Image (spheres, rainbow, N blue to C red):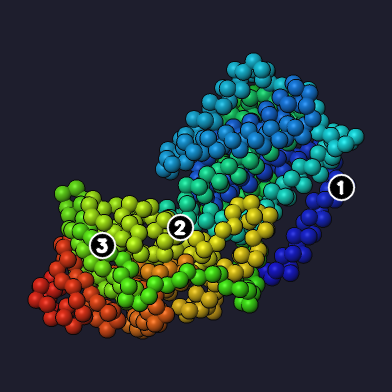
Amino acid sequence: MSKTQFRFLTLAALFLLVASPFYLNAFSMTLLNYIGVYGLVALGLVLLTGIGGMMSFGQAAFVGIGAYAGAWASALQGYSPWVGLMLAIVLSCSVALVLGAITLRLGGHFLALSTVAWGLSIFFLFGNLDGLGNYNGIANVPPISLGPLKLVASWQMFYLIWAIVLLALLASRNLLDSRSGRAMRALRGGNLLVESLGINAFFTRLATFVIAALFAGLSGWLYAHLNRFVSPAPFEVHVGIDYLMMAMVGGATELIGAFIGSALVTLTKNSIQDYLPMIAKGASGQLEIVVFSIVFIVLLQRWRGGLISISSHLLPSPHHDIDRTVTPLSRRPLPQPGEVLLTADQVERRFGGLVAVDKVSFTLNAGEILGLIGPNGAGKSTMFNLLTGALRPNSGRVVFQGRDITHAPQREIAKAGIARTFQHVKIRPKMTLLDNVLLGTHPRTTSGFFSGALRLDRAEEAQARAEALRQLQRVGLGDKPFELAGNLPLGNQRVLEIARALAADPVLLVLDEPAAGLRRQEKQALAELLQSLRSENLSILLVEHDMEFVMGLVDRIVVMNFGCKICEGLPLEVRQDAQVQDAYLGGLV
Ligand code: ADP
Ligand code: MG
């Protein structure tokens, strides 16, 4: 679908929504209100789980915090509901900040388990606090008032709820299309890539977690004033599972899926409650859960990506106008050619009894291509990871531009100007080529979550996009910037990684076996690219198994075997070295 068609459909849908009080009855309006309130929680879960890859069963707890904050402030303390709103926001965000800081460092399943734990404990907390009415809850929550107007009727609440929903949706959409949002989208698939790009993965997770809690807290506040009564039951863990279901069923990676899921779950529950008692008298409560589960297992079996995946072709393709005339992002000064850029000094790394890198020393000068070669298992990748901070050495030192980076985190090394690629390509296949390369510009740009959500980042974003496109063109992938990276053949994926590395404006480019899996012409093109980069004074460390590829390309070579450096010199000297010929079993050299 084209962008114009999509805009037209969106406007039509908005019109239908805004006009709904004129053609829907009060009961339907109430359903629509709950769809909005629950959808807000699911929206947070789409960001957290679908996009950020963090599973939470405890989201109902944040809804509870928002609801109780609103009810306590207005019904028990007599403050305006708007004071309750502030309290709901502050409390849900700060609880998320503390819980997140404790639990987000835990890996996959542990995180999910801990969400169950806090979900349970907050439920019991509400039930046992005398000041919050114990398990009886808080009744007589007043309606929200706008000046003299009290929002009592369902259509009045409808406008407030859906205004908040649409704002949250818009802010989320803006965010995903910004620097911080790209970092969120890159979280799925592991920390290694994210940190190597200079992105703080933990901070990004924490911020995503707080945003999801904020949406849940807002939803809770709305719930309290919609329902006019709060008790612990709607914030139990099993309700948290319902929210997760809404996000998954709708389509966990599309924002709008949250509301499709919320509508589906809310309407299905509603109609099950209508029909089941006719079939099974008495036990309809349990049967509801059974029928409900079956429906969703079938749905998820059939459509992994949620219902939105059936119609995802209806969404417009991710296309941006790129203004090439903007001022380019500023570049860092490159060192004088010939200066010592990187020094590895007696670097050692052991894995148990195995010495993968055994006291290896070498230097790399600015403006040269240095080849680090050796047979499989020689310790090249390990050395590579020690230089880029992905691994820590047991002893020895690594100095980059006069700075000791031996124990610096990956992120800091990336920011200092070392950009890397991976032996096993790491891209984000569901993101476009442009977005993948834009990830590389992260350390050169500064916009945060707020400016992304509020679109205050457009000037910088335009610069970053122009830069990303320039790098795509530089490596020869400039013709289809909006293609999904996963659709590229392997050879081009490697080249895409190089474009991403270049987008970081590195001083030193380190490549791990970039020629592996490439065809002859592709290797040739890669060699030409690397040579042209050198002519622009970029320094390159090339870790390679393929000796022929290295020979005509590099200025100097360091050879490793069984973890030790066995030879160093000009390509021709190295080729004639007896130890090297031995290491490569004679025939290959
Ligand atoms: P190369 O890249 O030269 O092929 P590597 O650096 O990948 O070699 O591996 C060097 C040696 O270290 C190999 O024997 C490998 O099995 C071992 N090794 C590498 N990484 C690990 C690890 N994380 N744990 C244990 N052993 C490892
Ligand atoms: Mg390797």
* Of the two numbered discs 2 and 3 in the rendering, the one whose residue sits closer to the viewer: 3
Describe the element under mark 2 as helix, strand or loop: loop
Describe the element under mark 1 as helix, strand or loop: helix
Q: Nearer the viewer, residue 122 or 323?
A: 323
* Of the two numbered discs 2 and 1 in the rendering, the one whose residue sits closer to the viewer: 2
Q: Nearer the viewer, residue 355 or 14?
A: 355
Q: Where's residue 102, x and y in %?
A: 47, 36
* Of the two numbered discs 1 and 3 in the rendering, the one whose residue sits closer to the viewer: 3
Could you tell me which residue is drawn at 56 percent across and 69 percent down? 329
Question: How many callouts does the rendering have?
Answer: 3
Residue pointed to by mark 3? 344
Could you tell me which residue is drawn at 81 percent across and 44 percent down? 159
Q: Are marks 1 and 3 in contact (CB under 8 Å)?
A: no
Residue type for callout 3 = Ala
- Label 3 environment density (alpha carbons within 10 Å; few <14, some 14–19, many ≥20): many
Asked if residue 527 can be seen in this view, the reply is yes
Residue pointed to by mark 1? 23
Determine which quarter of the picture holds residue 62: top right
Q: Where's residue 143, x and y in %?
A: 81, 31
Residue type for callout 1 = Tyr
Q: Where's residue 32, x and y in %?
A: 76, 42
N-terminal of the two: label 1 or label 3? 1
Could you tell me which residue is drawn at 47 percent across and 47 percent down? 202
Determine which quarter of the picture holds residue 466: bottom right
N-terminal of the two: label 2 or label 1? 1
Could you tell me which residue is drawn at 46 percent across and 37 percent down? 103
Q: Is residue 424 left or right of residue 445?
A: left
Residue pointed to by mark 2? 198
N-terminal of the two: label 2 or label 3? 2
Q: CA distance from mark 2 to mark 3?
A: 22 Å
Compared to 497, does 522 lie above or below?
A: below
